[in-house]
Image (tube, rainbow, N blue to C red):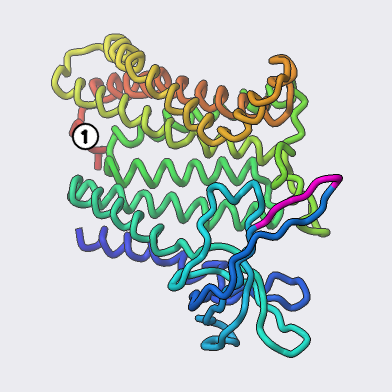
Amino acid sequence: MKKTVFLFCVLLFFPLFFSPLALAVSDGQDGQITVRARVEEVLADEMVSTPYSGGEISTRVLTLRVRILEGAFEGQAATVRQVFDEISLPSAYPAKAGDLLFVSLDLDEQNLLVGTAADYVREWPIALLAGAFLLFLILFGRQKGVKTVLSLAVTCFVIFGLFFPLAVRGVSPVWLSLLCAALMTGCTLSLVCGFTRKALCAVLGCLGGLTVAGLLAMLFSYAMRLSGIVDEEAAFLRFLSDEFVLDFKGLLFAAIIIGASGAAMDVAVSIASSLDELSQKAPDLSARQLFSSGVAIGRDIMGTMSNTLILAYVGGAIHLILLLYAYPVPFANIINRETVAAEILIALCGSMGMLSTIPLTALIVSFLHRHTAEHPFHPGKFPE
């Protein structure tokens, strides 16, 4: 238990020491830097109208006096502006005294610090929410909860410490996503289930389902003629480096593999755990009967899990869907847009990979059950 907690702490805090976020970040424009600052006073709050294309645009401009909290100008005062346009104004949160902001600073002609408010500092509420989530897992799950938190730390490290840093440097996202999926699946299920036959079956079943999802993604992304450049962020990434060009089709493949891996793990461990328990309670069951039971259990799982994936993808694209519904565009035009087609591909390939995990896991469990019946050993452990 002590080793588990120690390993959890190492994996949880190791990425923080190598975080790409600095206390003061240069944004590369005329020497501007972005730092944290505390609002001391709102100096002015006014509406400004600007003529534009025969009409006018109204913006709300706040002039703030802030105190710099970090970097070369720590402790100094600066005057910054916070601007809200007509689009963001109805749901905006104008700054007030005591708020923490990220501000982009520069020196004016009189060598005084001026700048603009970039965004609010949200790390403390995020940390509080994440801490509450981890505490709930540990209090509810106890030792299993600690292992769950540890598996979550491993997953975050693999995604944010390996996949993204290597992908942004031009490493093939296809092979990278497969490697990361294998690492996440193996580590997570081994931590949660231990080094048992049940964990082995779940890992193999999950990887089999992800393989199906990957093959379908390769086939149908070609059939749909998808370039992978589906949004503004992808367009910006085209100019990321002169040394290499990102593989956007590969990134689409990676999105499917990584997006489906969580649901596939969930399904795989549910089937493997159920059949492992069933085989121990009823050791006389044949491999065929065990496989049939696994498929029957999987039928009850697949309905809700398919909805989980589809609804997760719909939730992520809710603004795009609302925008398409807001304008009288024919349905055929909507589904044939690359942005929409890519979301459909991700959702359906991920769901089919998850569904494939059910019979594959059941087949692997029943095969190992027959092998164990012929060469018996402790039902939950591998032989020494």
Q: Is residue 202 left or right of residue 45?
A: left
**Which residue is situated farthest in the left direction here?**
281
Q: Quadrant of the C terminus?
A: top left
Q: Position of residue 265 (x, y in %)?
A: 40, 34
Q: Is residue 293 left or right of residue 180?
A: left
Q: How many marks?
A: 1
Residues 188 and 316: in front is: 316
Q: Position of residue 138 (x, y in %)?
A: 22, 52
Range shown magenta:
53-59
Predominant SS along the magenta part: strand
Q: At 33% from the left edge and 53% from the top edge, which residue is drawn?
A: 150
Residues 266 and 91: in front is: 91
SS of the residue at dot 1?
loop
Residues 383 and 244: in front is: 244
Report if residue 377 lies within the magenta region. no
Q: Quadrant of the N terminus?
A: bottom left
Density class for disc 1 (Cα within 10 Å; few <14, some 14-19, many ≥20) is some
**Residue 349 vertical placement versus 159 (above, below):** above
Residues 20 and 196: in front is: 20
The type of residue carrying mark 1 is: Gly
Which residue is tagged 1? 380
Q: Position of residue 188 (x, y in %)?
A: 37, 44
**Residue 270 vertical placement versus 48 (above, below):** above
For residue 173, what is the image quadrant? top right
Q: At 54% from the left edge and 81% from the top edge, which residue is drawn?
A: 68
Q: Is residue 173 left or right of residue 12?
A: right
Q: At 25% from the left edge and 52% from the top edge, which residue is drawn?
A: 146
Q: Position of residue 6 (x, y in %)?
A: 28, 65
Q: At 73% from the left edge and 28% from the top edge, which residue is drawn?
A: 338
